[in-house]
Amino acid sequence: MTETIHIVGAGLAGLSAAVALSESGTRVVLHEAAKAAGGRCRSYRDAALGLDIDNGNHLLLSGNHAAMGYLRRTGGLGAVSVAPDASFDFVDLRNGESWRLRPNAGRLPWWVLVPSRRVPGTRAAEYLAPLSLLKADPGASIGEAMACEGPLWEKLWRPILVAILNTEAEAGAAGLAARVLRETLGAGGTACRPMVATGGLSAAFVDPALARLRAQGAEIRFGTRLRALQIEEGRVAAALFADGEIALGREDRIVLAVPPWVAAEILPGLSVPTEHRAIVNAHFAAEAAPGRPPILGIVGGVAEWLFAYPGRLSVTISAADRLLDMPREDLAAAIWREIAPLAGRGGSPLPPWQIVREKRATFAATPAMDALRPGAATHLANLVLAGDWTATGLPATIEGAIRSGMAAASLLQRNSGAPGDVVARA
Ligand SMILES: Cc1cc2nc3c(=O)[nH]c(=O)nc-3n(C[C@H](O)[C@H](O)[C@H](O)COP(=O)(O)OP(=O)(O)OC[C@H]3O[C@@H](n4cnc5c(N)ncnc54)[C@H](O)[C@@H]3O)c2cc1C
């Protein structure tokens, strides 16, 4: 009998598990509740703007090696632009000051000794502050592990940590921040080159993966919502979808790659992070004036990061729960007032806009929520978990989601040949 692996959820975790498993010749069926794949990392046509937009601007760094590997394997790398070097433009709206942060390529961070490469008015020694995150106790918050004050905190560490964790920086888990910093800034500028899916998230992360899966014979089902699992003798005997039931044979297995609140409904008693943080994106049908940076960090305003795409300006605001109740029109107008001059469009009237508020964009990357994240293996013999909220050691990011899918796939592969049992040797 041939083994089938059912993957539930076609976000990046499910897609990365599916790609890894189908590459190894396993029969894969991917089930997705929505009409399209990509989950929290997808593109769609926005009628108000008349443009294709992403649900949110996604920034990766070249040190995100699992994401790079996934893009190479699926053929999506061509839809991503990777900056030739690590260079980050910032502006402080409080005094108009602007600067460009330029870490050098190698691991030895000599750039902190060169005033023109660092934040104005800061000293080299201040750049060592995050080293204390690397030595922090497990379970420590950033506020407990490092000094959260001073100009460099305000102009560099806070904005970076909020973007990495999507959580108020002081409350964030020191261990999660340390892991990201170690793999990016700590690995030198070569690992910090910004990567953006300029042609849209789906063109880079979703469509090529689906094409590859189809070419490998995987079955992909959309509009199929998993409602429940039928458990018998410690294993999943059947998966109950909205459109019907699928019985699992002795050798069949299942990867649950759905968001944490869905996983907890389907597997009562499963430990999952329960607090989330919002991300707000504002999109404007306007183009930056020539010479403006493609990505701009904004300090001291409502907007945090401004992305300039052809024909579109997009703003990201992380840990944005405070903005969820603000009227959309007011929010769009406030953000446009801030960014129009930065994009060389000062004085222009508000162009067509769209506000996208993802209320549960990611789990809150606090020590308490991090402690609730489960590993890939479960108490059920033929079921494993994937998702950015599982215990990847990273915050909820594309890199974490892709690694979680790979971890689920390798757990299943390590145990292949032991029908239906992925726990015993996990
Ligand atoms: C606005 C925004 C901005 C972000 N910015 C960045 C960034 O700059 N950099 C970065 O690295 N990360 C960023 N992230 C995080 C990143 O998008 C996520 O970590 C990643 O996409 C999560 O993938 P996932 O597969 O774990 O989960 P999801 O994408 O949530 O996938 C789960 C899938 O399961 C499906 N599903 C749910 N219930 C069922 C069911 N019952 N049956 C079948 N299918 C079901 C869903 O429809 C979905 O497709 C951002 C996220 C958001 C929302």
Image (cartoon, rainbow, N blue to C red):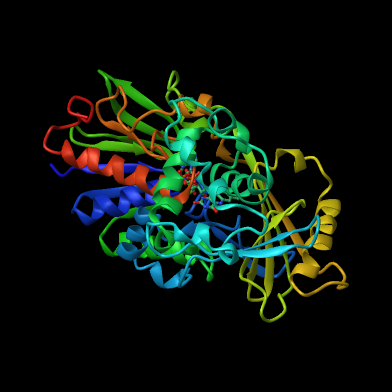
Viewed as shown, does residue 53 lie left or right of 183?
Answer: right
Give the answer, above or below, for where 186 lies relative to 110. above
Residue 242 position, x and y percent, is 47, 37
Q: In the drawing, does residue 287 fall left or right of residue 160?
A: right
Residue 16 place in picture, x, y as percent: 35, 51
Q: Residue at x 44, y 61 (%)?
A: 189
Tell me residue 148's x, y (percent): 63, 37
Left or right: where 211 falls relative to 328: left
| Relative height, residue 71 to residue 418 (above, below) | below
The structure residue drawn at horizontal position 35% and vertical position 30%, both measured from the top left corner, is 375
| Any part of residue 242 in sight | no
Q: Is residue 28 above or below residue 381?
A: below
**Residue 152 x, y percent position in the rendering:** 64, 48
Determine the residue positioned at 46% across, 47% down: 181
Q: Quadrant of the N terminus?
A: top left
Q: Quadrant of residue 387?
A: top left
Residue shown at 48%/70% (left/top)?
Answer: 83
Observer-nearest of 117 and 172: 117
In which quadrant will I find the C terminus?
Answer: top left
The total number of labels drawn is 0
Q: Is residue 42 visible?
A: yes
Q: Nearer the viewer, residue 16 or 69?
A: 69
The image quadrant that residue 341 belongs to is bottom right
In this rendering, is residue 324 above or below 338? above
